Amino acid sequence: MYVWVRSAAVQALGQLGWADEATLAGLLALARDAQVYVWVRSAAVQALGQLGWADDATLAGLLALARDAQVYARIRYAAAEALGQLDRADDATTILLALARDAQVYIPVRSGAYVGLKRLLAK
């Protein structure tokens, strides 16, 4: 049950629509922590996307998560999708396009990149 509580708390942060740099850093740290359960990490990434903006450190962290083949596909998918929710199209488009086109990338991750690109183009 503890995992679901943490996941719900992280999701609530994303629904606030605003976060200071400390909250962004905390969510990113949670998303990167390999000791944290995958559902909580994924929820942290989704919350970062829901917030709709990111500082440079958060953007770099999401880009790294989306590209890292050692990260669970669920987290990579969420990172790719979250990148599409941010107002940083110039920074995210190249990475998302590369992920979407790369046949070596796991299909769900490519799908997340496609969803992220679609969102960026819709803005």
Image (cartoon, grey):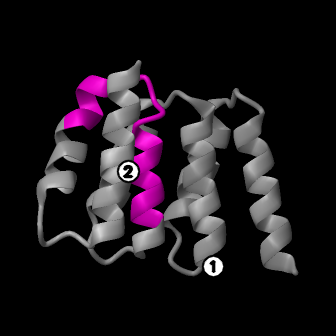
Which region is colored magenta? 75-93
In the picture, measured across the screen, residue 35 lies left or right of residue 40, that is: left
Counting the numbered discs, the total is 2
Q: Are marks 2 and 1 in contact (CB under 8 Å)?
A: no
Question: Which of 101 and 64 lies nearest the eye of the viewer?
Answer: 101
Q: Nearer the viewer, mark 2 or mark 1?
A: 2
Sequence-first disc among 2 and 1: 1
Quarter in which the C terminus is drawn: top left
Q: Residue at x 78, y 76 (%)?
A: 3
Tell whether position 62 is magenta: no
Q: Residue at x 55, y 29 (%)?
A: 52
In the picture, measured across the screen, residue 56 lies left or right of residue 5, that is: left
Residue 80's tag is 2
- CA distance for labels 2 and 1: 19 Å
Q: Kindly identify which residue carries mark 1.
A: 37
* Occupied quadrant, residue 21: top right
Q: Is residue 117 above or below residue 75?
A: above
Q: Residue at x 57, y 63 (%)?
A: 42
How many C-alpha atoms fall within 10 Å of the one at disc 2: few (<14), some, or many (≥20)? many
Q: Main secondary structure of the magenta part?
A: helix
Q: Disc 2 on helix, strand or loop?
A: helix
Q: Residue at x 38, y 50 (%)?
A: 80
**Is there any visible trace of residue 88 in the rendered image?**
no
Query: In the image, residue 58 lies at what x, y percent?
Result: 45, 41
Q: Disc 1 on helix, strand or loop?
A: loop
Amino acid carrying label 1: it is Tyr
